[in-house]
Image (cartoon, grey):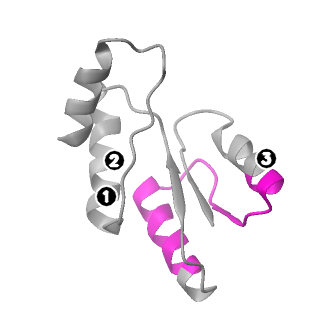
Amino acid sequence: MLAGCDNFRSGAIEQLATHAACLDLPLYEKGYKDDPAVIAKEALAEAKARNYDVVLIDTAGRMQGNEKLMRALAKLVHINNPDVVLFVGEALVGNDAIDQLTKFNQ
């Protein structure tokens, strides 16, 4: 199951819905209003009720200097205790990747 928890970027939920349809995967989303950590928790409960083994939680992209987004990610991880947290970086980021990964891991 995919969980749409990016309520920061306009069009993020619709983009994820397109991917979910192309991959024939269920999508859990609540639009752009709710707290991403709460949406993720609800998605995990829904996945468990439907006997899904894996939930990929899509969150907003993080700029290491944006403390609000970094705190939101920390809250999501704290509340939902995921098995794996992945950082997906841009190929063109260059040396800034080291700073991004350092902040991400904090």
Looking at the image, which residue is at 20% across and 31% down? 102
Looking at the image, which residue is at 27% across and 43% down? 71
Mark 1 vs mark 3, CA separation in Å:
26 Å
Instruction: Give the magenta range.
Output: 20-47
Disc 2, SS:
helix
Looking at the image, which residue is at 29% across and 38% down? 70
Give neighbour class at mark 1: few <14, some 14-19, many 20+ (Cα, 10 Å). Answer: some
Q: Amino acid at mark 2?
A: Leu
Residue 8 is situated, as x and y percent measured from the top left of the image, at 52, 37
Which of the labelled discs sits on residue 53, or is there none?
Answer: none
Q: Are marks 3 and 2 in contact (CB under 8 Å)?
A: no
Left or right of 38: which side holds 28?
Answer: right
Q: Are marks 1 and 3 in contact (CB under 8 Å)?
A: no
Disc 1, SS:
helix
Quadrant in the picture for residue 81 = bottom left
Q: Are marks 1 and 2 in contact (CB under 8 Å)?
A: yes
Q: In front: 28, or 89?
A: 89
- Residue tagged 3: 18
Residue 94 is situated, as x and y percent measured from the top left of the image, at 37, 12
Mark 3 vs mark 2, CA separation in Å:
24 Å
Give neighbour class at mark 2: few <14, some 14-19, many 20+ (Cα, 10 Å). Answer: some
- Residue tagged 2: 73
Quadrant in the picture for residue 65 = top left
Which of the labelled discs sits on residue 77, or is there none?
Answer: 1
Tell us which disc is closer to us: 3 or 2. 3
Residue 104 is situated, as x and y percent measured from the top left of the image, at 27, 37
